[in-house]
Amino acid sequence: MAGGVSSSSIMETLFQRTLEDLIKGLRLQLIGESAFVSKAIEEIRREVKSTDPHTKSTALQKLSYLASLHFHDMSWAAFHVVEVMSSSRFSHKRIGYHAASLSFHDDTPVLLLITNQLRKDLASTNEFEVSLALECLSRISTPDLARDLTPEIFTLLSTTKIFVRKKAISVVLRVFAKYPDAVRLCFKRLVENLDSSDPQILAAVVGVFCELASQDPGSYLPLAPEFYRILVDSKNNWVLIKVLKIFAKLAPFEPRLAKRVVEPICDHMRRTGAKSLMFECIRTVISSFSEYESAVKLAVVKIRELLVDDDPNLKYLGLQALSVIAPKHLWAVLENKEVVIKWLSDEDPNIKLESLRLVMAMVSESNVVEISRVLVNYSLKSDPGFCNEILGSILCTCSRNVYEIIVDFDWYVSLLGEMSRIPHCQKGDEIENQLIDLGMRVKDVRPELLRVARGLLIDPALLGNPFLHRILAAAAWVSGEYVEFSRNPFELMEALLQPRTSLLPPSVRAVYIHSAFKVLIFCLHSYILQSESITSSFPDNLVLGVSELVLKKNMLEGSELTTCEAPSAHRSEGFNPRNQSYEDLSIKNGGDRTINHGQTSTPAFSENIFTYDSIINLINQVELALGPLTGSHDAEVFERTRHILCFIELIKGEITECLVQKGKTLESEEMKASKIIKLISDAFSEELGPVSVSAQQRVPIPEGLLLKENLDDLETICADFQVPESNLFSLGSPYYGEEVGVSSFGLQDKEESEPSNEATSLLTEHRKLHGLYYLASEKNEIVGNDYPPANEPKLQVNPNNDTEDLVKLTVQSLATNKKPNHAKTRPVVVKLDEGDLVTVTAKRPETKDDLVSGAVREVLLGSDTRTATSQSNPSDKSSSKRKGKEKINVDRSELKENLGDSEKPKHENPSSRKNKHRISGKERRHKSAGKIGEEREENGQKGMQKSSHRHARHKAPHRSDAPLNVVSQTPVIPDFLL
Amino acid sequence: MIRAVMVMNTQGKPRLAKFYDSVPVDKQQELIRSVFGVLCSRAENVSNFVEADSIFGPDSRLVYKHYATLYFVLVFDSSENELAMLDLIQVLVETLDKCFKNVCELDLVFNYSKIHTILDEIFFGGQVLETSSTEVMKAVEEISKLESASNSINLVPKSVSGWRGR
């Protein structure tokens, strides 16, 4: 038996493919890569079970290679990895460790098995074995491993072997992150390494502190003198860069630090020949010490050097530095204006982008027109990507703070129109939003807005560009909403109903139809107003027109009438409360509005375009264009078409009749139709305003409404029903539309899936078979099938209709905050109380980092954050063993604190708190008396005040503590800072 | 901290990939692909930076250098200096050059293990530990010696003797 095993193993050894063979085979590609790899994996699976360590490790090496460069999963081999790691031969061990750091993660079950192996190797006399273990630990350490191996790492932190010590220093970072309590043991030794004269050690330890300080800079303030010494003494650029980074992070926490370090930083900036160090100095000054004018000036001189350098990297970084400095020192940008604009046409996309950002930073009220002109010209010449970057940044800058920098809105609106026509423009969403937003906020711009909208609408070429559909939707909305400013509403109607609108997606088309409705109402209303005042009679050929109309109408709609009446009646009932409020408002607003009509529209229509003929034509036109749409499968399009056709049905008979008999029985007959028209016209003429972002929140949630109910199960059910549902819809006649309207959310889906119905059902089948396997890629597939990506957002939201409704509902919640008048007459821009300002809630990463910094503070200052940290320990993954240990820690810490003072002071009691700090500080000094002198002690005190404040920050803002801060700090100002 | 080191050829084939955050393998492949997608669209003689936030998430930067048929890529966060990282790529390439005498893509293809040895001497858990190619070479040579020593003693003799012994 035994002989059999060993002979098979030697066969394996002799005929096993080495890694090199594997690579060669892969390169030959005889049977295709994936086939070859799976064959190789099969082989490896067999070989890795071998009893011969060499065979085993070679197999593992091959597996690591495939995992690393062919992205093959190797988690199944975890146990073999552990076996190879424990080999006594260095070459095998190395393969094992490499595989472990490649494939192990926190949940790997065999991790528990390697603790002892790691411990053994960490204590090895062979520094390369130690190095392997450290390297592995830096990648895969878990809380358990970190806890168990902390003593070994502690020992290694002061080993004389530089090669090992630098790695031990670096691994501390990972150990602290996983097991914060390790700080208590190791931190002091880590700090001692800051005094090392060896450049490698220094680089390692400074790197570690740079990482630590980025998590919670405040805790490391007491080490500032050490860092300062390195900043002044070190000649190593790598070390200096890291120290600068540390100071950049510490600076905001201790204002007095700046005074002391600015000069050495400037020295480095002047003297160094290394561009990397120079740039780091620049960055430190402009980001953290920007109030030191002389330093900033020097930095700007140096930035200038970078900007004119031939190296594109330096150019790029120079521009980046300028954009950092721009908010505080715009002069620095203005000084370099020419260079910045010059790089706008650089061949490097990075540089172009940066200079674009800078150009936008320079934009102000006075130059926005010129800069926009220049940029739009640039955009015409640029590639699509950069063109859209330019357009995006113009849009973003101009709309900042509710169009703060725009004075001439007519200009801006026409610029938006112009931008829409730029061939590569893909900013439809943003332009759409701004067109509507401007219409609602800026009353004075509406005539120009309508002009721009008209220009966009009447151009049939634009309808073919899917990127413009959103803009066209906005234009259509504008033309309906502000039709009273139009010179020729008939022309608008023609544009809204032109045949090529069939190219629009349904959601946009619905807006077109609704806008057509508004235009129609406006025309009818104007006509009635006019005919009321003019008592002239009309041509005689009316009767013919009427009968023709009636006939056509009957043909077109016939029986449909019954179906469409019901919903409209229902709707008017449902919306009753709103109608009332409209009426209330129309008493207030309607009055204004009609006066407006008189003022603005009368001159435009002086030729009296609302003749009987034109109105009849208009109605005919609408009926003709919309008639076919009653068969639409889209709920929005269908409903709106129905509304408008029913409305025409309702009024047409009367309006024509009453007009025929006008001369005779004017008063009694005319009333009904014109009343309806007036009513709707009043409804439409109510002004829409912007809606506060928080408007939704202000609506109280009705009782019994469960908004946060988990609907996950629903999803699976819906997925199952998807196929039959869409079948039903695609087969359905227009009359099913009513039902469709009820469940309108299914509709967009239907439209999408219709063309690829078969594929969808296959996919669904497949999905059922294979569980959730395809869920991840589902989204792509659906999108990829139908619409170009630019349309995607539209399918989810129906912006205009939503906006409209919302606006109507919340129009009362507006308040007009008039801006103080500009020197130039700037139109009033409606702003909301709130919601126009985006509230930035910057959340700092807390939890674990806090544990580390809490422990650091404790070690450095002997503070009392211990209990807090161990209590709030979030990592509950740890085993019961670990918990036990923690408990001990807590007990110990409590004991220690009890030494200080028995009653636990609360945050509100600063004096007793201070007392306690002093005591615990002393205690600390006793413990580490030799190393840390009086000065440090004082630092400790100061830093601790700081830390205690930071601690209390959750409750009270920092500033409120300030007076107290000053009092308590004065005696303990550390001299290194002054 | 350095988040990833990658070397890929101009066809997008990865030649070396090391991630210092734990990233699942399929995600690694995806990341390398998207990086290559950006790199191959960039002209020569432009800056060596790529805005990587869209690929690697916020606060990530990417520098790369193009040597012959290979792209060397470093991904890191704001704790590192961009220009220093470019220098570091230079250090890496210099070291490879010292190690292989006029390094070319094939050297990287066939020396998987050795390249990782070099890499592990320069980078350690996402930190830069060594920036001198001489020092790196010293360590790499030591390790190679140790490896071949442990192999030469044991490779054939052990299995053969084990076989005879039975």
Image (tube, coloured by chain):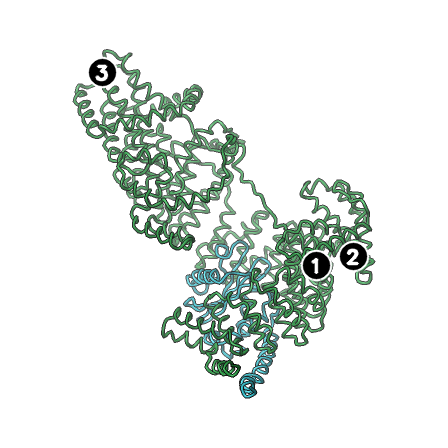
Chain of the residue under the numbered disc 3 shown in the image: A
View extreme (bottom): residue = B164
Q: Which chain is green?
A: A
User: To which quarter of the image does residue B120 belong?
Assistant: bottom right
Q: Give the secondary structure at mark 2.
A: helix
Q: Which chain is cyan?
A: B
Say whether residue A814 is visible: yes
Per the image, the residue denoted by label 3 is A537
Chain of the residue under the numbered disc 1 shown in the image: A
Which tag is nearer the camera, tag 3 or tag 2?
A: 2
In the image, what residue occupies the spot 67% across and 49% down? A872
Asked if residue A304 is positioned above or below residue A643 in the image, the reply reads below
The residue lying toward the viewer, choosing from A899 and A255, is A899
Per the image, the residue denoted by label 2 is A936
Amino acid found under the numbered disc labelled 2: Arg
In the image, what residue occupies the spot 24% across and 26% down? A614
Which tag is nearer the camera, tag 3 or tag 1?
A: 1
Image quarter where the N terminus of chain B lies is bottom right
Amino acid found under the numbered disc labelled 1: Val
The residue lying toward the viewer, choosing from A798 and A331, is A798
Asked if residue B19 is positioned above or below residue A395 in the image, the reply reads below
Image disc number at residue A183: 1
Badge 1 local density, few (<14 within 10 Å), some, or many (20+)? many
